[in-house]
Image: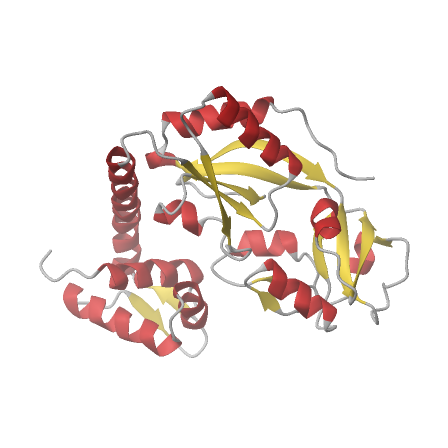
């Protein structure tokens, strides 16, 4: 274990999931060359190749596959231990740190009020998390739980109450062909570039929120995505309540028919679950559904 560097391990994990040096760098907020340097340093410590890289593809070696299988649970346990230590350090009386993407909607705020009313000694700190990183803050222990756009298919995370099912709209520039329409259908959405989430959002999550077949730009934050839409770089799918909370003179919001409703879910780390998180999940599940469509 002498000289073990956590950044090298994080680099390997990101590369193992993305199988692309550029995307792994985006996920870690470092350059592609830095990813190569960190991987090379880790392979020197191991004494063998963990990743095979050719001009066409990136893949794990058999040793890399075995290393990943052993490393992932150990890495998750390390983060869980840190989260548990922070909880103990707070004496179990600190605020519940709750992440949210984009907008804290009426349903969530009602749950926060109900929780704080029922537990006068506890408060909830609301923390905005990036549009393009729905699960990172939970994994890092930066928040105790987070309300994220679904889907969620992460084995180390728990999906709690699902709520706020809302119809979808598409945000486009005033000059876009969809502008001025009273509605568009799902088939039409597939014919235009859609603005998607950048890494580190998982590929399945990015595909769910930009389901078209025409390549479009990516964004890290909601405001960045809306700006791309305003400048005509692409169209952006988002739920109706989020659209109503972000009016812009240079953006038109058009209802979309034929797409599944968007939905929010409360998620937390499986190994860092606390009684406070479970209690908030119970309160959230008991709040009357709020439909914010007109």
Instruction: Give the percent coordinates (x, y) of residue 159.
Output: 50, 35
Query: Can see residue 245?
Result: yes
Horizontal side of 294 relative to 168 (left or right) equals right
Quadrant for the C terminus in the image: top right
- Comparing 226 with 154, the one in front is 226
Q: Residue at x 29, y 44 (%)?
A: 73
- Comparing 72 with 252, the one in front is 252
Query: Can see residue 195?
Result: no
Horizontal side of 193 relative to 256 (left or right) equals left
Instruction: Give the percent coordinates (x, y) of residue 128.
Output: 51, 50
Quadrant for the N terminus in the image: bottom left
Instruction: Give the percent coordinates (x, y) of residue 93.
Output: 33, 29
Instruction: Give the percent coordinates (x, y) of residue 123.
Output: 44, 32
Question: Is the residue 101 above or below the residue 59 in the image?
Answer: above
The part of the image, by quadrant, that contains residue 145 is: top left
Q: Residue at x 38, y 60 (%)?
A: 14
């Amino acid at each position: 274990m002498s000289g073990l560097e956590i950044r090298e391990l994080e680099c390997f994990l990101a590369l193992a999931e993305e199988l692309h040096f550029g995307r792994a760098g985006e996920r870690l907020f470092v350059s592609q060359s830095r990813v190569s340097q960190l991987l090379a340093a880790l392979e020197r410590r191991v004494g063998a190749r963990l990743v095979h890289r050719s001009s066409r593809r990136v893949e794990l070696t058999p040793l890399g596959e075995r290393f990943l299988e052993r490393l992932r649970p150990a890495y998750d346990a390390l983060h869980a231990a840190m989260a548990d230590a922070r909880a103990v350090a707070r004496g179990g009386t600190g605020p519940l740190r709750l992440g949210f993407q984009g907008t804290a909607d009426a349903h969530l705020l009602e749950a926060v009020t109900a929780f704080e009313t029922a537990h006068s000694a506890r408060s909830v700190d609301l923390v905005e998390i990036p549009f393009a990183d729905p699960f990172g803050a939970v994994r890092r222990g930066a928040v105790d739980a987070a309300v994220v756009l679904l889907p969620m298919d992460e084995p180390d995370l728990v999906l709690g109450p699902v709520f706020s099912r809302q119809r979808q709209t598409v945000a486009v520039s005033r000059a876009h062909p969809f502008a001025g329409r009273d509605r568009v259908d799902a088939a039409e959405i597939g014919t235009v570039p859609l603005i998607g989430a950048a890494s580190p959002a998982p590929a399945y999550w990015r595909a769910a929120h930009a389901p078209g077949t025409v390549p479009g730009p990516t964004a890290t934050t909601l405001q960045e995505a809306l700006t791309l839409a305003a400048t005509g770089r692409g169209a952006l799918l988002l739920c109706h309540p989020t659209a109503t909370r972000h009016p812009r003179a240079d953006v038109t919001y058009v209802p979309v028919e034929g797409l599944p409703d968007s939905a929010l879910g409360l998620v937390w780390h499986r190994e860092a679950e606390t009684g406070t998180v479970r209690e908030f999940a119970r309160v959230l599940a008991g709040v009357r559904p709020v439909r914010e469509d007109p």
